[in-house]
Image: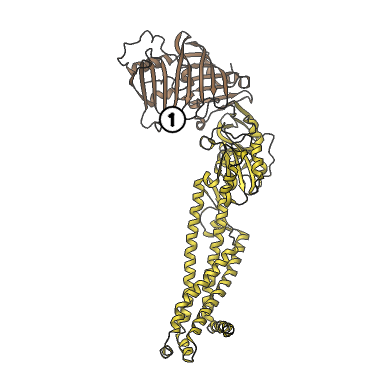
Amino acid sequence: MPIRPVCAAAIAAFMTFGVPSGSAARVQQHPTPPDVDAVLARLDDLYRSKSSIARMEVIVTSPRSTRTMRLKAWTRGEDEALIVIEAPPREEGTATLRVGANLWNFLPRIARTIRVPPSMMLGSWMGTDFTNDDLVKESSMHKDFASRIDRRSDAPQGWWLRLDVRPGIVGRWARIDILLDEAELPVEEHHFDRKGRLARVITFDEIKTLGGRRLPSHMTLTPVDTPGQRTEMRYLEAQFNVALPDDTFSLSRLERGK
Amino acid sequence: MTMRLRLPTTWRIAWRNLWRNPRRTALALAAIGLSVTLVLLYDGILRWEADYLIDTITGPMLGHVQAHAPEWRHTRAMDKTMGRVSQAVEAVRRDPDVAGVDVRVYAPALAALGEEGFAVVVVGVDMAEATRPSRLLQGLKVPLGGRRVLMGRLLAEQMGATQGAEIAIVGQGIDGSLANDFFTVAALVDTSVDLVNRQAIVMPLADARELFAMGDEAHELVIYARDPARAQSLATRLGGSPELAGVEVLDWKTAAPGMNDLVELVAVMWVFILLLVFVAAAAGVANTALMSTFERTHEFGMLLALGTAPSRIVAMILVESLALGVTGALLGTALGGALVAWAHHVGVDYAKLTGVGPSSVSAWGVTFTMIIRPRLAAIDIVRVVLAVMATAILASAWPALRAARLQPARALRE
C-alpha cells in the first residue's frame, strides 16, 4: 500500500503537500475510525503524478542566530524536485535538484554542481534542520512502514496514525506518529529514532487556501535533542497541477537557476 | 679494630676462592650477567614504550590537555565553538607547564573534484604548532595559505585527486550560511591518524575560519604539556583560569579513556613480562650461589676442623656470593647498557626482528610504527644491581648457615 506519511518530514513532502481538496467535504462522522488505507491512499493519490510550483520562506532558528531564506520549488510526482534559493543575496541562485534517490547542489559562487554522496545524506540541507535524506526519502516511505489508525485524539479532535518500520528495513526512524484533524489534515508528526526515542516533532498550522486547496501553510520542525533549535517553513504562494516543461528536473536547468 | 682488618681479609679470601674454580665462576658470572642484560633490555623497552605510546597517542591529535565548548565533544556541531580564542591561547601559553598550543577547527563538508561529492572533515590547524616534531604534520615543509590545503592520502585516492588538483569545498558556515570555495591540493599527507588520512582536508586556521565565517573562535584548543605526567593538574589549573571560564578542559586520559586503557594495558603486560624475567634472573643467581656452596662442603669441613670460627665461614660465603653477584651484575650492566644504547641508536624494527607482521600497526585509529628505541634511566640499573645483591645474599644465607653448623668430621668425609 503506497502511503506517504504526511509531512513525511520532508521538505519535498511539504512542497508536494497537496492535501485532499475534497476532504473537508468528506469528513466522516467520527468516532468511526477512518479506514487507514483509504486515508493514506487518498493522500497519496493526491500527491502522485501531480506537479507544483511554490514559493516559500524558511526560517532557521538556533541559539546563535535566526536566518531566513526564500525558496522557489518545483515538484513533479514523488521523485522529482528542484529548489532554488532566491534570498538572501549571499545564497541567491543556490539550487538543489532531486531525481529519485539522487541529490545535486548547484553553487553559483563557484559555478559548480556537486552530487551529495550517500554518506552525507544525514547532513543538514542548506543549514536547516532538514537533512538531505528528508528530501529524497519520500518515495520509499510507503515501502518501509506498516501503517494503522492508532487511537482517537480529543484535542484537537481527530486520529493518530501510526507507522512502524517494517522488519529488516534500515533507516533513521523506527516509528512515525501522525495526528490528523477531523478534516484529515495533518496537525502534528512525531518521529522516533531506532532506539524508540522521540527525535523530532513537526507541527502544522496556519491553514489557508493556496492554489485552490486548503492546507496547513506553516510547519515547524523541532529537533528534540537540541534546545533552542528549530526550522519553520511557510508557503507564500503555490500552484498545483501545473504543466512543467520536461527539462525542469535536469542538471542543465539546475545550473540555470530560476 | 679486628673487624676493620678482618673484612678486607674476608673479601680477599672470598675473591681468591671464587677463582679457585674459574670455570664454575665464569659460568655463574655468565648466568648472572645474561640475566641482568635481559632485565635491562626489557627495562629499556618498557621505558621507551610508555613514552612512545603516549607520544604517538597524544602528539598528533589529542594533546595532553584539550579545551572546547561544553557540548562540542558530544554533538560535534559546527556552531558549538569557544569564543575569544586569542585571549584563551595567550593565557594558556603563559602557564610554565605548557609546551605548545594548537588551535583547531573541525567542519564537516563536501569536497568535489568533479561532480561527485565526498564527505570530508575540514581541519583547521595552527601550522606553526602542527608541524613541530611528533605533531600531526611533523616536518611538513610545504607552504600553505592562499587556499592551498593538504589532503589525507586515502581520501585523495578515493576522490581521484592528486597533488595540484583543484577541489571545491562546500559546507555550512557557523552562521548557517553556505560556505563554498575552491582550493588547491598542495600535498597529500600520511599521518599517524586514520581519520585525517581517510577524511581530512587540513588547512591553516585562518583559511578555515574564513571559509566557515568564523571569528575569533575555534572548536578545540590542543595543549601540550612539558611533562605529560602532569596533564591532569595542568587541566585542572587551566580550567580554573578566567580566560577559559565556561570551557570544558580535559586531560587526555579523561578525553580519550580508551587510549589511556590501551597505554595501561600495554604497561601491565610489559611489567608482567619484566617480573617473569626478573624472577628467572633471580633463580639463576640463587642457583649459582647454592651450587657453589654445596659443592664445597668438604672444604668447609676442613676449615672448621682447622679451627675457623663458624661466623667467619658464614661471612666468607656471603661475601663470596655478593662478590659474584656484583661482578655478574656489572658485567650484565655493561653488556645490557651497550645493547640498549646500540638499539636506541639504530632502532630495532620489530617486524624484521620477528620475521612477521607489518612494521606499523593501526589500532584505535592511530598508527603505531614498531621501531623500538629502548632507553634506560639510572634507576633501572641501580634497581637491578640491588636486586642481584639481595638475591645473592638471600640465596647464600641458607647454605652459609648450613656450612657453619657442619660437623667437621662428617663434612670431611663427604
Closer to us: B64 or B156: B64
- Which chain does yellow denote in the image? B
Q: Colour of chain A?
A: brown
Closer to us: A15 or A181: A181
Left or right relative to B84: residue A39? left
> Can you identify the residue that label 1 sits on?
A172
Residue B323 position by quadrant? bottom right
Q: Residue drawn 63% across and 49% down?
A: B97
Q: Quadrant of the N terminus of chain A?
A: top left
Specify the farthest residue to the front. B1
Q: Position of residue B183 (x, y in %)?
A: 65, 33
Residue A100 visible at all: no
Q: Position of residue A74 (x, y in %)?
A: 52, 16
Q: Position of residue A174 (x, y in %)?
A: 39, 29
* Vertical comparison of B78 with B196: above or below: above
Specify the farthest residue to the left. A32
Q: Residue drawn 37% across and 26% down?
A: A145
Residue A146 visible at all: yes
* Vertical comparison of A38 with B411: above or below: above
Q: Quadrant of the C terminus of chain A?
A: top right
Q: Pointer 1: residues within 10 angstroms few (<14), some, or many (20+)?
A: some
- Secondary element at image label 1: loop
Q: Which amino acid, by three-letter code, is at mark 1?
A: Arg
Left or right relative to A180: residue A52? right
Q: Position of residue B217 (x, y in %)?
A: 62, 34
* Vertical comparison of B322 with B252: above or below: below
Residue B61 position by quadrant? top right
* Vertical comparison of A58 with B137: above or below: above
Pinpoint the chain carrying mark 1: A
* Colour style of the rendered protein structure: by chain
How many marks can you see?
1
